[in-house]
Image (cartoon, coloured by chain):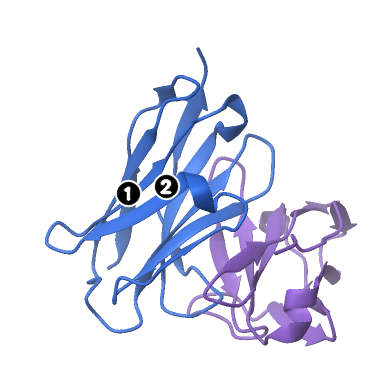
Chain colours: A purple, B blue
Amino acid sequence: QSALTQPASVSGAPGQSITISCTGTSVGSYNLVSWYQQHPGKAPKLMIYEVSKRPSGVSNRFSGSKSGNTASLTISGLQPEDEADYYCCSYAGRSTVVFGGGTKLTVL
Amino acid sequence: QITLKESGPTLVKPTQTLTLTCTFSGFSLITSGVGVGWIRQPPGKALEWLALIYWDDDKRYSPSLKNRLTITKDTSKNQVVLTVTNMDPVDTATYYCAHTETPDAFDLWGQGTLVTVSS
């Protein structure tokens, strides 16, 4: 069960779009990838599940996709409050999951 | 409204066993498909999944920590308990419990509890 690989950091200006990648063999094996947003000192918040589904209340500026062993989180129309750490998570078989190393998003 | 809250010691000594309790409301762990998981986060580091228990008492553990973890539930008290044996300073982390009804996602989280391992 290997951790998923994410870029350490990404940045974008307000109004722009950014994409965070998440790579791993478990990503390619199952259509079961979720994404979490975490502000400093706060608990993670679910933003995307099952690759591309948004929970109720999550802005449609957040979208998810997958190609092969890489899943992606795209945030469009960047806003200052989007600045946070983002983690991907994938089902890894036998009812286990694995998280990515996290990506720090800076809104310039 | 679903809520979860972690409780337990804030400081443990090396080699001791850590026992954490997740007390939840707004759902039942006897409902088909429902699970509660534990995830931890060392200061300044990434999330790490630890364990998961389902409504049918199916239990799953992180392969890397499997030998040190035990997860149990008390449905009458709406609690899930995680024990971690042989604690080490590298186990210093914020420990979260979270609700799940899908194989890949934890949709609601507790506030977390910081556990420091130090002599």
Kind of residue at badge 1: Lys
Kind of residue at badge 2: Gln
Residue A11 in the image: x percent, y percent? 87, 56
Q: Residue furthest front?
A: B67
Q: Is residue A59 found left or right of B17 in the rendered image?
A: right
Q: Is residue A83 found left or right of A21 in the rendered image?
A: left
Cβ–Cβ below 8 Å for labels 2 and 1?
A: yes
At x 64% / y 81%, what residue is drawn?
A60
Q: Which mark is residue B72?
A: none
At x 22% / y 76%, what residue is drawn?
B30
What residue is disc 1 on? B5
Chain under disc 2: B
Q: Is residue B11 above or below residue A61?
A: above
* Circles 2 and 1 on the same chain: yes
Q: Which mark is residue B111?
A: 2
Labels 2 and 1: the sequence-earlier one: 1
Crowdedness of circle 2 by 10 Å Cα count: few (<14), some, many (20+)?
some
Crowdedness of circle 1 by 10 Å Cα count: few (<14), some, many (20+)?
some
Residue B8 image-quadrant placement: top left
| Circle 1: element type | strand
Residue B87 in the image: x percent, y percent? 50, 30
